[in-house]
Image (cartoon, rainbow, N blue to C red):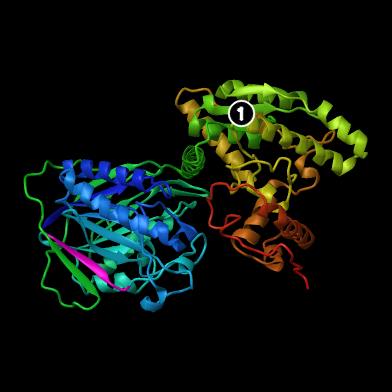
Amino acid sequence: MPAVRLALAQTNPVVGALKANSDQIVEFTRRAVAAGADLVGFGEMAISGYPIEDLATRPSFLRSAHDSVLALATRLKEEGLGDVPVIVGYPDGPFDPRLEGTSNAPTAIAQNCAGVLYGGELIGRQAKFHLPNYSVFDEYRNFIPGDELIVLRIGDVDVALAVCEDIWRDGGPVSRVSSADAGVLFVINASPYERDKDDIRLPLVQKRSLETDTVVAYVNLVGGQDDLVFDGDSVVVDQHGRILARAPQFEEHLLIVDVQAEAATPPSITEGINRIELPKRGGAKPPLASDIAELPDDREQIWNALVLGLRDYVEKNGFPSVILGLSGGIDSSVVASIAADAIGADRVYGVSMPSRHSSDHSRGDADDLAERIGVHYRTEAIIDLVTPFETQLHLDGLAAENLQARVRGVILMGLSNAEGHLVLTTGNKSELAVGYSTIYGDSVGGFGPLKDVPKMLVWELARWRNEAAAARGEVPPIPENSISKPPSAELRPGQEDQDSLPPYEDLDAILDAFIGRRFGPQDIADLGYPPELVDDILRLVDRAEWKRRQSAIGTKISQMAFGRDRRLPITYRPHG
């Protein structure tokens, strides 16, 4: 069987940064050409970033993206890279939906395309057939579907194209690949990370290779975009589903692999297929070393996702530093550690804000954490700020407790305004679910690294991070006491979380059943939990929706994150 050398460019674009993203594409193409690649492919929307959401409804943006693709093709030729086909994802348009006849909404004037650049020109473009409209995806709102398959003949091998969702559904391009007698299926993707998603993604790629009897090359984006993080994990499998090459997660990478594919044959069908014949580059090629990255364990993957999500939010939005409250508790300790790993401890600012109820051990744990990690650290006691409010407004009980959190929020936002830091919230998914936070208090901030991380997983990640540090001969960043002590907001004497919440093992299990698996009250009770407890927890979740609507965004790691995934009314009476 003939061989073809594929280059999968796993890049980290910035939404809207057309020039910078084009520069990135040129640089990766240069490296691929130097390595003897016959075909170079980039991820879905690599030239515009993804998702572009309602930017797809702006004619000016679409024209700029189209012009950038044409300029990129010219530049590749001018730089001596024009004799290798380059597949690049981009939004094309604007199109008149009335003329297309397949629009999904009055606003749909764009198509999500894979463009083929060669010889200084855009020689072909294939629009995405299947438009996802679930979870974080809203493409049915913004795009017009395609209906033509591109098959590139590169020397003696036919390469068919597909765009992300097109391989997740039967029909469309996948159904035509076998009929088109292609030897390679090249898929460009923007597939966000979710915990255990690889248990679904890789088997799907392998399934499509067996169904179509082709080599499948799957190239994915990498990087954070608002609350999404793309993990890369690009992969190439042969006709039998065996992994030939695999890129690492959470980092940019150029994956180059030689594949043996079925020789191209005279086409058996032509309808719905745009065939483009290209010469294969000649010349001897040095043999390639095996490039198959190993996936780290589950905890490390999650940690890396949280680190990259925060790093790219900070860097892509131009924040010089981050600031957060350090209480000595597990949540703030983990957030500080994530931040230090993401952008360096010298750009992390921690503030201890003790009240009259703050314990000596909590203050000591915060001091210890700051020293271990090496962040900037200061103490701003709140008692002299809280007392005038309590006195003038005659606050006590819950109102006085919430006041402490709100004063802390004012301190952090004041320092943010004065010094330019991004404020990080430290609340976790379990607390956010049941409303165990103070609006405009500990919920204050621009980004919540633990927003989609349940409490039990927070502890698990803390232990893993310390173990990883110890294995490398480093000082574990998180004080053991912060991990082992009972969690408390310390807003009144002797307070512990478990005074008003069930054990977190039970709480997280109930929340996962209700939020993640969409179980009803009776379904959850049938798992062995007291019906009264289930009703109480579900009532808290429903009543806290108004708080969640106002919460900071945070990196999504689950299949059902608050925000894009779970959209429920605030005004809601579940029992009639």
From this view, report whether residue 374 is shown above or below residue 219. Answer: above
What residue sits 22% from the left and 75% below the top?
179
The residue sitting at 83% across, 34% down in the picture is 494
Q: As shown in the figure, which amino acid type bears the numbered disc 1?
A: Glu
Viewed as shown, does residue 403 lie left or right of 73?
right
The N terminus sits in image quarter: bottom left
At mark 1, the secondary structure is: helix
Crowdedness near tag 1: few (<14), some (14–19) or many (≥20) residues, C-alpha within 10 Å: few
Residue bounds of the magenta highlight: 147-154
**Chief secondary structure of the magenta portion:** strand
Q: Which of the 4 quarters of the picture holds residue 288?
A: top left
- Is residue 352 depicted above or below 545 in this figure? above
Instruction: Indicate whether 548 appears above or below 142.
Output: above
Instruction: Using residue 142 as the reference point, say whether residue 519 is left or right of it.
Output: right
How many marks on residues? 1
Q: Is residue 264 visible?
A: yes
Report which residue position mark 1 lands on: 419
The answer to which of 275 and 417 lies nearer the viewer is 417
Q: Residue at x 10, y 51 (%)?
A: 281
The C terminus sits in image quarter: bottom right
Task: In this rendered view, identify the residue nearer to me: 354 or 244.
Answer: 354
Residue shown at 71% from the left, 68% from the top: 522
